[in-house]
Amino acid sequence: MNMLPPLPARAALVALLFLVAITAFADESREARLERLFDELGAATDEQSARRIEDQIWLTWLDHHEPRVNDMIAEAMQRRREQDLAGALDVLNRLADLAPDYAEVWNQRAYINFLLQDYESALSDVAETLRLEPRHFAALAGRGVIRLQQGKTALGYQSILAALEIHPYIRERNLVPESLREGVTDPSAN
């Protein structure tokens, strides 16, 4: 007795399993790339090297597996560059509905809300970014800047110092007094 499905059904099943395997491999390779880049970033010994690695991390973060999502994030960023913050926010709101597990949509939306001085919405989006990508140094630093804007200095410093643990040359490091940064930004101190 043959327990296998008919040939067309088997072919469809094999094709489906192949697509699932490719998707899983792509996700694993993206994560492996990020792991390697974060290791390199943490070990960077100069700002120029750190910036090159940071750029590669940003390219990886911004690259989504669905072209439509990539197009929408590009549109939102273009609108932001054109100072159309309301338009950028509209695109990002739609994108958050379309791809809620895409950390960068939340980070970009946090940035737009920050620019609009809607700090509570920005903080909510930062929290979602960090839930999806705990190593998101820009979200951590952004949360620190928001807290400083709100007059919550200790919380601001805490967030920026957390970002420094991931990215030793993050630009916002200069917002924290040097005495609090000792050993954090010096890669040789690790």
Image (cartoon, grey):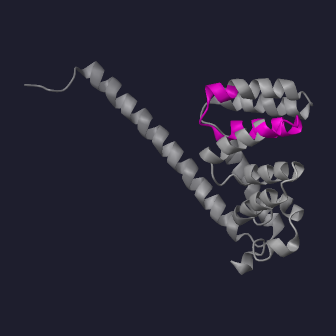
Lateral position of residue 99 relative to residue 54, left or right = left
- Vertical order, 154 against 5 (above or below): below
Q: Is residue 54 magenta?
A: no
- Vertical order, 185 against 61 (above or below): below
Q: Report the magenta residues as a range.
A: 95-120
The residue that appears at 29% across and 19% down in the rendered structure is: 8
- Please name the predominant secondary structure of the magenta segment in the image: helix
The residue that appears at 85% across and 25% down in the rendered structure is: 86
Quadrant holding the C terminus = bottom right
Whole-percent x, y for residue 125 in the image: 71, 39
> Front-most of 54 and 109?
109
Name the outermost residue toward the left: 1
> Front-most of 42 and 154?
154
Whole-percent x, y for residue 173 in the image: 84, 63
Which picture quadrant has residue 88? Answer: top right
Lateral position of residue 18 relative to residue 150, left or right = left
Lateral position of residue 27 relative to residue 130, left or right = left
Name the outermost residue toward the bottom: 189
Quadrant holding the N terminus = top left
- Vertical order, 2 against 35 (above or below): above
Q: Is residue 103 magenta?
A: yes
Whole-percent x, y for residue 72 in the image: 73, 27
Number of numbered discs visible in the structure rendering: 0
The residue that appears at 83% across and 65% down in the rendered structure is: 48
